[in-house]
Amino acid sequence: MNDNIVIADNDSEYSEAIAALLREKSFKVQTVANGIKAAEDLNKSISEGQRLPRLLIVDLSLPELDGIELLSNLAKEGNLCTVVAISSELKEEDLRSFIRTPFVKAIHKKDPKEVVEHLIAAANCTVRQSSTNKSNINNSNSNSNIIDKAVAENNIN
């Protein structure tokens, strides 16, 4: 089982707090501070024959290459893994941009302990999905339901 998780977030204090909590749960965690570094690292792993991470946690407002662009580029290249979108400001139009990416949850940045519970649930979702067809993971209707749920859960206008 692949227990690697990548956190792409320019808020190093926040991402390290999340990483520490995930490491306590026996996950291997890598943090990167911008979208370009995340894309480079993921593409390097693929070119070296390594597996994609079990979970990619992406801040929507990454510098240099934002989370939406990062995921769009990875999806175009066929480099898909399960994604949780995080942001201090979730907007419905941003979430709708994720429609063609395999994200399973969108959550507001808040207390890292609360966020980690959602991330572990998403990682467990990844394990269940790994035995299904990839096209099911990247299903627009399914992601549309996830967006609608995120909008409702986070009171997004």
Image (cartoon, rainbow, N blue to C red):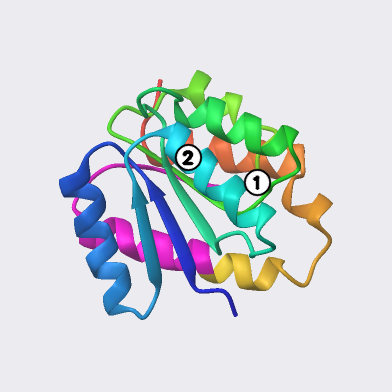
- Mark 1: secondary structure: loop
| Residue 70 x %, y % | 54, 32
Residue 90 is marked as: none
Q: Nearer the viewer, mark 2 or mark 1?
A: 1
Of the residues under marks 2 and 1, which one precedes in the sequence?
Answer: 1
- Mark 2: secondary structure: helix
What is the CA distance from the residue labelled 2 to the residue labelled 1?
Answer: 15 Å
Q: Quadrant of the C terminus?
A: top left
Residue at image point 71% right, 69% down: 130
Would residue 61 be found to the left or right of residue 44 on screen? left
Q: Quadrant of the N terminus?
A: bottom right
Q: Which residue is mark 2?
A: 150
Question: Three-letter amino acid code at disc 1?
Answer: Pro
Start-end of magenta stretch: 103-123
In this orientation, which residue lies closer to the viewer: 4 or 59? 4
Instruction: State yes or no: residue 43 in magenta.
Output: no
> In this view of the protein, can residue 142 be seen by the observer?
yes
Would residue 6 be found to the left or right of residue 10 on screen? right
> In this view of the protein, can residue 152 be seen by the observer?
no
Crowd tier of the residue under label 2, counting other residues whose Cα lies within 10 Å: few below 14, some 14–19, many 20 or above: many
Instruction: State yes or no: residue 116 in magenta.
Output: yes
| Residue 151 x %, y % | 46, 33
**Cβ atoms under marks 2 and 1 closer than 8 Å:** no
Q: Which residue is mark 1?
A: 102
Residue at image point 68% right, 53% down: 47
| Residue 125 x %, y % | 58, 66
